[in-house]
Amino acid sequence: SSIWLHQYYYVFGFLLVVFVILIITCAEITIVMCYFQLCAEDYHWWWRAFLTSGSSGIYLFLYSLVYMSTKMVMTRGVSILLYVGYMLIASYSFFMLTGAVGFLACLIFVRAIYGAVKVE
């Protein structure tokens, strides 16, 4: 009568915790890298902030290729094409998600530190 037959699944709570940790980690690393860049007086931080945390999507795609070549047994070209295509879409989505998180965190950080500067 119910979808999961009155059983509790803790996987979704665990995934939520891991997602929150991912968001916090991407934001913190991007803020630190942006701070180092601003200390070096390089004020073009926009794309670098996006690419710093978004590079995890590139890592995800490269790891999926390594996983495909070492652990999966695919003999047909169509299977390989489908796997690579879907992983490219998933990795691009992950790239955009983490990149946006890093950019927004860096934007809030830069506005906070430059908003505290008193010009008299």
Image (tube, grey):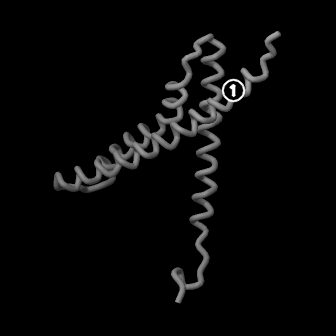
Residue 104 x, y percent position in the rendering: 60, 35
Residue 26 x, y percent position in the rendering: 59, 38
Quadrant of the rendered image containing residue 110: top right
Residue drawn 63% across the image and 30% down it: 107
Drawn side of residue 44 relative to residue 69, left or right: right
The correct choice, above or below, for 104 with respect to 32 in the image is: below
Which residue in the rendered view is the most extreme toward the front?
Answer: 120
Residue drawn 54% across the image and 17% down it: 44
Element under label 1? helix
Q: Amino acid at mark 1?
A: Arg
Residue 64 x, y percent position in the rendering: 37, 46
The correct choice, above or below, for 62 with respect to 70 in the image is: above
Residue drawn 22% across the image and 56% down it: 79
Quadrant of the rendered image containing residue 57: top left
Quadrant of the rendered image containing residue 105: top right
Residue drawn 50% across the image and 43% down it: 97
Which residue in the rendered view is the most extreme toward the bottom?
Answer: 1
The tally of labels here is 1
Drawn side of residue 81 relative to residue 40, left or right: left
**Quarter of the figure that contains the C terminus:** top right
- Residue on which disc 1 sits: 111
Q: Crowding at label 1, few (<14), some or many (≥20) Cα neighbours within 10 Å?
A: few
The correct choice, above or below, for 14 with respect to 91 in the image is: below
